[in-house]
Amino acid sequence: MFDTTRAFGSFAVPDPDTALEFYGTTLGLDVRPVPGMEGHGLLQIDLGGDHGVLVYPKPDHVPAVFTVLNLPVDDIDAAVDELLRRGITMLRYEEFRHDAKGIVREGGGPLVAWFTDPAGNVIGLIQE
């Protein structure tokens, strides 16, 4: 019934220019306006392998209370150190024990840390 080979996720931001700067420059992801939709503020974050996320403008945007994007990393310590160097603050949740950097290291699962984009959307870093 569905063509899952072309499925994709999306999330909203109030200002696509700020999102383009954050995701492209601050995080260093491959992000660009969607061809033919430049006037509408639609952005595509290319995650490689024909995978991507659509970012769309929503002036009355309210951030979700959950993670909208998870970014796998090989070395979470190095990734968190670099994000902190770039001025990003790691989130801390009461239900988890975080180390000094904001990384959750217990529970037998992957190592995880979270931060927000300028719109308040939660992004996770995961090292499995």
Image (cartoon, grey):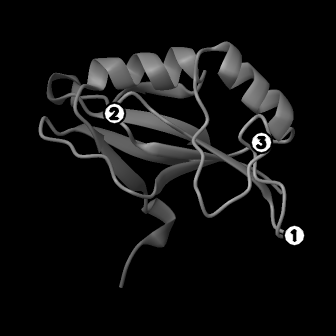
Q: Amino acid at mark 2?
A: Ala
Could you say which is closer to the camera, residue 67 or residue 92?
92
Chain-order first, disc 3 or disc 2: 3
Counting from the top left corner in percent of width and height, residue 66 is at 44, 58
- Report which residue position mark 3 lands on: 73
Upstream in sequence: badge 1 or badge 2: 1
Q: Amino acid at mark 3?
A: Val
The residue drawn where x is 26% and y is 33% is 42
Farthest bottom residue?
A: 1
Task: Indicate the position of residue 98 as horizontal and vertical percent values.
Answer: 74, 49
* Nearer to me, 87 or 6: 87
Which residue does the image show at 42% across and 16% down from the upper left?
Answer: 21
Residue 77 quadrant: top right
Do the CB atoms of the residues marked 1 and 3 lie less than 8 Å apart? no
Q: Which mark is residue 108?
A: 1
Label 3, secondary structure: give it: loop
Identify the residue at horizontal 33%, vertical 33% (top origin): 119
Q: How many angstroms separate mark 1 from mark 3 (CA)? A: 17 Å
Are there few (<14), some (14-19), or many (20+) residues within 10 Å of tag 2?
some
The N terminus: image quadrant: bottom left
- Secondary structure at numbered mark 2: loop
Mark with earlier residue (1, 3): 3
- Under circle 1, the secondary element is loop
The residue beneath circle 2 is 119
Q: At which x and y percent is residue 4?
A: 47, 71
Q: Position of residue 22 (x, y in %)?
A: 46, 21
Q: Nearer the viewer, residue 57 or 80?
A: 80
Q: Amino acid at mark 1?
A: Gly
